[in-house]
Amino acid sequence: MNRARQFLALTLLLSGTILAGCGGSDAPAQGSSASGEIARPQDSAAVPVMVAQAERATIPIQLTAIGTGKAFQTVAVESQVAGIVKEVHYKQGQFVHKGDLLVTLDEDPFLAALAQAEAALARDKAQAQLSQTELARSDKLYKEGIVSPEQFDQSQATSTAAEATVRADEAAMRTAKIQLSYCSIYAPISGVTGEQLVSPGATVKANDVPILVVINQVEPIYVTFSVPQQYLEPIKNSMARSRLRVSATPPGSTVAETGVLTFVNNTVDTTTGTIQLMATFPNSDHHLWPGQFSNVVLNLGELQNVLVVPSQTVQAGQQGDYVFIVKPDKTVDVRQVKVGQTVNNQTEIVQGVTAGETVVTDGQVRLVPGTKVYFTKTL
């Protein structure tokens, strides 16, 4: 019996020692985490939020719009003479340079016309030479009193007419050469060809349909866009000081092309209350295209020392824009605000917030005025 009591006492002693050893755990202390993040406080009603500080900054003054590409030049190439298309030397959609051969017409009729003009010139030159000889002879005889004045006048008129005929033949020969040169049609500008509108064997007329091809110059290129008329004076004032930079980003692209504002329309569209602007872009990589829409940003300068918050801070409500302000006691309050422009995910606060105040940037959906919060991250 004594042995049983001794065994039980020993067992209880060993169990107490083991439990005491387990109490010395290496677990993190309450209020901290192994990852270094701020742990949830003891108040189970607190809501996790992300916050940031309202601060002063310099932001650009920007106007945004939807722009449309417009060819720098557009030329509809037509034939200057009537003829038959012999060969087409370009491919539709091809980039061509000024002076590249586009189309050739059948030259045979024009070569024949040139040969005819040359023959007529040779004939009339011979006739003019004969008339000149007869005039010299008649002049000598007239001075000797052998021919009458009427005969001398007739010889003089015949010689003058023959010389005029030669000049007319020379003009006709030059015209024939020009007509022959029109059989080779060259690109008047550098640009991208459109659809091939004629094929070998087609008959074309002078300055008439069908048009041979349309060429759009895309390097450089214009982008047109419109902004509300209230920005007209700031734009004009900024243009007077310096060239205004414009960026254009086509849909599906993350690369913005940079150009300059080169044109302000001379009238406001009374139906929409907007003013049309046009910017010129070098477009050396043909990133922009005629007729293509793009997101346009016009830079008018910079705003110094303005109050900004992350754009996701501002919420839209029935009474206007508002933000959640975190007070020193870690409760939130709703503040109605007046906002300015938004640039690079930063929104200008014109009224309602002061510099240094803490604003909620994420987690607003669970907040009402007076809600207790704790910070998961500070921007």
Image: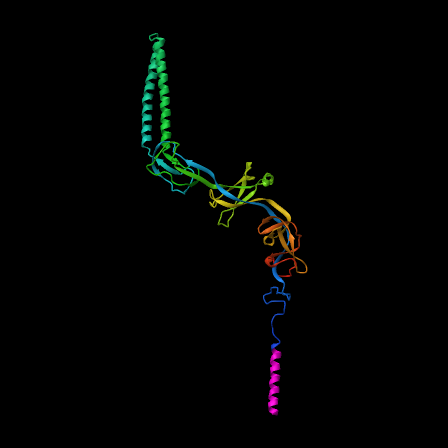
For the N terminus, the quadrant is bottom right
In this view, the residue farthest toward the front is: 318
State the residue in front, 323 or 361: 323
Percent across and percent down for residue 336 are 64, 51
Residue 139 can be seen, yes or no: no
Residue 5 lies in magenta, yes or no? yes
Q: Is residue 334 above or below residue 224?
A: below
In this view, the residue farthest toward the top is: 145
For the C terminus, the quadrant is bottom right
In this view, the residue farthest toward the bottom is: 1
Percent across and percent down for residue 55 are 64, 53
Q: Is residue 201 left or right of residue 97?
A: left
Overall secondary structure of the magenta section: helix
Residue in the picture at 61% in, 81% down: 17
In this view, the residue farthest toward the right is: 328
Could you tell me how many numbered marks the image carries? 0
State the residue in front, 133 or 284: 284
Q: Is residue 31 above or below residue 22?
A: above
Q: Is residue 242 above or below residue 143?
A: below
Q: Is residue 88 left or right of residue 294?
A: left
Q: How is the image coloured?
A: rainbow
Q: Is residue 96 above or below residue 179?
A: below
Residue 83 lies in magenta, yes or no? no
Which quadrant of the figure has residue 242?
top right
Q: Which residues are magenta?
A: 1-21
Residue 76 can be seen, yes or no: yes
Percent across and percent down for residue 259 are 53, 43
Percent across and percent down for residue 274 are 56, 40
State the residue in front, 139 or 306: 306
Which quadrant of the figure has residue 150?
top left
